[in-house]
Image (cartoon, rainbow, N blue to C red):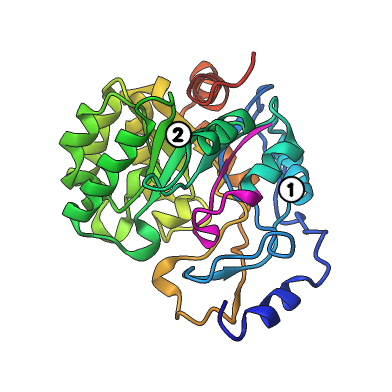
Amino acid sequence: MTHDEPAIHRRLATPVGFMNFDHVSVPRMSVPEASCDCHVHVFNPVQFPYVQNRTYTPGPAVVDALIAFEQRLGIDRVVLVQPSSYGTDNGCLLDSLARLGPTRARGVAVVDSATIKAKEVDALHAAGVRAIRINLEVKGEQDSARAGAALRRALDFVAHTGWAVQVYADTSVVLALSDEIAAAKTPIILDHFGGLKSSHGLEGPGLATLVQLVKGSNVFIKLSAPYRVSKQAPDYADVAACASALIAAAPDRILWASDWPHTGSSSSRGGDLSLVEPFRVENDGRTLDLLADWSPDENIRHQILVDNPAHLFSFEA
């Protein structure tokens, strides 16, 4: 740890068990039973300190707060995604999965494929892990050669586990790797609209490539965190056509997620790890209601919220 790390963790130890969700509206649309929020994080830095080589210092967002948040939305299941602030130490993820239980939660881990032992893989699987994550965006990785190497290492690692590979990268990187992604025999999950950004244009080759990829048999795309795509809050009108196009292309390979508790953007971080980065204030009830605008068909929304995650992450019936 750096010299200021103990002070950081003392500050993070301030009691914060209660998180206020008054700003989150109850969804107007009917949320089906067994719906799944496919991308959330838990941060418990008091019990599980962050790694030294992180890029930011988030505040606490513990399991009890997550449960209260999902209850407000009417969502029964979650997929916990290992955040970059924990590196390859999946201790917090495993603890959170145990607290939530196998009927409610699955996990996406981050691993060092060169050093992880078989018994550790077995323990992750038993706990509910069903995918590993490559987070290229958090460090602004744009080099397609390095990104391709990371993807190939991940695909090799999961070849005998039955897990998926989850990729968070800018659409430019996805474009560069599109042939490898399309050829993969392992399910690949693309985070946050496949890395689309309104600043690069939402109707160009990026969307066309994502539509073609999701039409394949192995690519899933999360309709998650539209604030990472668009600046047109709160309704993100420029995202609607993209979301509708992806849903129309392959409704059986689309997922929905909140990205709770809404960490900041890597582009706005100054590198001072002594500062606790505040979470974004997002009305997830309103964002969930956008799904009804993007997909008016209730049966398709059931696919997106219930059937697709149940199949991909092996939830019990």
* Residue lying farthest to the bottom in this orientation: 3
- Identify the residue shown where x is 46% and y is 28%: 295
- Identify the residue shown where x is 43% and y is 26%: 161
Name the residue that disc number 2 marks: 294
Relative side of 145 to 62, left or right: left
Q: In which quarter of the image is the C terminus?
A: top right
Label 1, residues with CA under 10 Å away: few <14, some 14-19, many ≥20: some
Magenta range: 77-92
Q: Residue 287: which quarter of the image?
A: top right
Helix, strand or loop for disc 1: helix
| Disc on the earlier residue, 2 or 1 | 1
Is residue 82 inside the magenta stretch?
A: yes
Mark toward the viewer: 2 or 1:
1
Helix, strand or loop for disc 2: helix
Q: What residue type is labelled 2?
A: Trp
Task: Report x, y in % for residue 195.
Answer: 34, 49
Relative side of 68 to 245, left or right: right
Is residue 174 inside the magenta stretch?
A: no
